[in-house]
Structure formats: C-alpha cells, structure tokens
Image (cartoon, grey):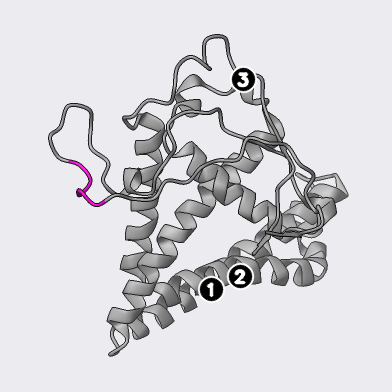
Amino acid sequence: MRRYELHTQNARAKPGHAENPRDEHMNAVDYALLAVLAVSGLLAFLRGLVREILGIAAWIGAAVISLWAAPFVRPYTKTYLGQYLTDPTLQDYAAFGAVFIVAVIVLLMISHWVGALVRQSPLGGVDRSLGLLFGLARGAALAVVAYIAASWLVPMDRWPEMVLQARSLPLTYQGAAWVAGQLPQPYRPMLYVPPKGKDAIAADLLYATPAGRATGAPGAATPSITIPSTTTPLGKPPARE
C-alpha cells in the first residue's frame, strides 16, 4: 500500500493544555458543526440535488455573463450614473453588478423551475435523497475550508480553547489534509495538527448527546481515527509498506 504524508505544522500548546486531554463530551463547537450539517442537509433535501447543482451553476454562470456583458453596459452606467460615480472604476463595478443581479435572478428562476419539474417526476424521491447527501457533503466542505483558512490566518496557539477541545477537530483536520493532498505542490497549504487528546470517532457526530444523558451510541465499537503527529514534507516520494 502506498502512503502519502502531508506537510503540517505542530503548534505550541497552550500552558497546561498537554496535561488536559480532549474532553469526552462534545462542546458548543461540535454542536455548531452538527447544526451546519443538519441545516445544509435539510435545505438540500427539500430542494433536491438538481436544484442545488443548478443553483451553484446559476451563480457561476451569472459571474461569467457579467464579465462578458459588463463592457456593453458600461456606457449606460456612465450616462445615467456618471454624476454620482465619477470614478471610471466605480462605473465598471456598477455595470458588472447590474448585469450580475439580472443574470443571477433569471438563472435562479430557471433552476427553480427545472428543480420543481424533477421533484414532481417519478425521480423526485431519488432527487431528494441525493440532495440530502449533497447537503451533508457541502456542510463538511465548509468545515474543511474553515480549518484550512484558520491554519493559514491564525496560529493554533491563538485558537479558542473550545475549538481545540472540540471532538470534531481531528475529523475536520483529516478532511483538510485530504483536500490539501489533492492540490498541486505549489498550492498546498500548511495545516496545524490538532493537539493530542482522545481520538475522535465518527460515531461521536452521529450519536451526540449532552453530558449526563443515559442515551448515546449503540454498543457496537467504532474504529477510531488516529491523527499523525509528525511533520514531513508533502510530495515525499511514496514508499511501499
């Protein structure tokens, strides 16, 4: 089996942090992540996969249309808004914004109409089910992007203690490490390895219960995900085990 190791940074632990392992119970950060996953999944389930995909395409398409059509609209913004926007750059922005607003409204209306047709068809159930999976994946992607951005902008020793103690942090790091590993070598970000603590397991997110409750995950054991603690360069030649 081939193994690729990610170039990471180990942050200096906060005073007393190493002696305090990650809490066994989920905290507010974990529940916030669950809320993001739930809302994203529910919205995608209600809208369906087709409408979700077309909705994203509508925003991208509106941006492309605006880049193409803005030069044709700029003379009108200069004529009607020139007395308010004397800077040519602002006139360009106004032209782009006007085209973008019109384009995105039209394209979103089309995506809504097509999505409604699919939901009312015999494939409506499949469309909603796939939409739910898409919504959960989108929520997880938002968490991964947030982890990458935080590693890039803020040193880990300045992260809030509640974030460092979150049971979902190692899982989020695993996702961020996988995404970074798919990028070309010059664009791979540096990621902080979460501080050591109780290994996170996927069941913690599926069977979250407040502290003191008698309910929880089923008795079946769930394999844990161990987070690597070494620092090695990304792109290291793969070695066979």
Instruction: Tell me which label, 1 or 3, sits earlier in the chain.
Output: 1
Front of the two marks 2 and 3:
3
Mark 1 and mark 2 in contact (Cβ < 8 Å)? yes
**Residue 75, position as x, y percentages in the image:** 82, 64
Badge number at residue 106: 1
Image quarter where the N terminus lies is bottom right
**Residue 202, position as x, y percentages in the image:** 38, 49
**Residue 51, position as x, y percentages in the image:** 43, 73
Mark 3 and mark 2 in contact (Cβ < 8 Å)? no
Q: In the image shown, does 128 or 136 lie closer to the viewer?
A: 136
Find out whether residue 141 is within the magenta segment: no
Residue 82 seen from this side = no
Find out whether residue 219 is within the magenta segment: yes
Residue type pointed to by label 3: Arg
Residue type pointed to by label 2: Ala
Range drawn in magenta: 216-220
- Name the image quarter holding residue 60: bottom right
Residue furthest to the bottom: 122
SS of the residue under disc 2:
helix
SS of the residue under disc 3:
helix
* Residue at point 59%, 65% (across, down): 59
Badge number at residue 103: 2
Q: Overall secondary structure of the magenta stretch?
A: loop
Instruction: Tell me which label, 2 or 3, sits earlier in the chain.
Output: 2
* Residue at point 39%, 66% (across, down): 133
Query: Which residue in the protein does label 3 denote?
Result: 158
